Amino acid sequence: MSNLKRGIIFALTFVLLMGLAVPVLAVDYNPGVSVDQWVEYGNYVAPEEEDVVNMTKVGVTAVSGKEVTLSEYTGYRDGTDEIVDKVYDVEAGTVDGEAATFPGILIAANLNEGDALPPVDLGYTVNTSETRTYLGVSRSVNIFSYTEVGEGYTVSDTFVYDKVSGIRLEVQTDVTMDTTTVTYSHSITDTNIFEEPEPTPTPEEGVPVEYIYVGVAVVIIVVAVAVVLLLRKR
């Protein structure tokens, strides 16, 4: 095979791979919350022998690029409490720089069914998107479910997130050992995120995906024309 043909094959392969990569690049992970927004959780269900949480309040104290700082207050039924600040990176899927095992309180905003949930190497995706009612308000939500089966046990998790803000609305974990199932769950009880009507998502700044497709098509055409001209000269 001549060097010319090798070059042509390499160029066409590179351009085609660029075209295949476009759908992946189309997912943009950005925070959907702002400073001073907050959410409270209650309705905690857990085995009585554990340190049962009575309520949790999470407030946004800072937003910088892909990172959101949350102040998390937890009150326990025994009267004790604690406040912890955590930094969530919605693109990397990390909490305080460590990769999350499961999605936490916050994920990226405006994800759609089938989109990967960071850290993407874990293989988690948004299972479904639908509309649900919370606190009397109809909201678009993203749902992630996961089941782990081990020797003598099964763990099933379901996380529900507000689509526009990316904040978690409820979670339920069912742990089954032999014939006994224990449920852990909690849900939103109050928030100021719903105070304004749910906005219509707007495209992020940058090159629209449609333009990228057109650009790839143009490059393919240019390469094809160049190949024809080179072959004619040969």
Image (cartoon, rainbow, N blue to C red):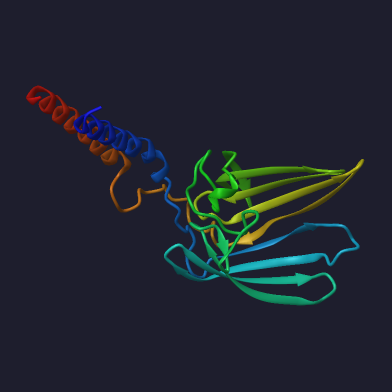
User: Which residue is most to the front?
Assistant: 1
**Most foreground residue, 77 or 102:** 102
**Residue depicted at 63% across the width and 48% down the height:** 160
Q: Is residue 35 left or right of residue 23?
A: right
- Mark count: 0
Q: Is residue 37 left or right of residue 27?
A: right
**Residue depicted at 79% across the width and 77% down the height:** 80
Q: Position of residue 96 (x, y in %)?
A: 58, 69
**Residue depicted at 65% across the width and 54% down the height:** 102
In the displayed structure, 64 sits above or below 111; it is: below
Q: Position of residue 123 (x, y in %)?
A: 58, 44
**Most foreground residue, 34 or 215:** 215
**Residue depicted at 19% across the width and 32% down the height:** 4
User: Which residue is most to the left?
Assistant: 233
**Most foreground residue, 97 or 223:** 223
Quadrant holding the N terminus: top left
Q: Position of residue 195 (x, y in %)?
A: 52, 59
Quadrant holding the C terminus: top left
Q: Is residue 21 left or right of residue 95?
A: left
User: Which residue is most to the top?
Assistant: 232
Q: Position of residue 137 (x, y in %)?
A: 58, 49
**Most foreground residue, 88 or 191:** 88
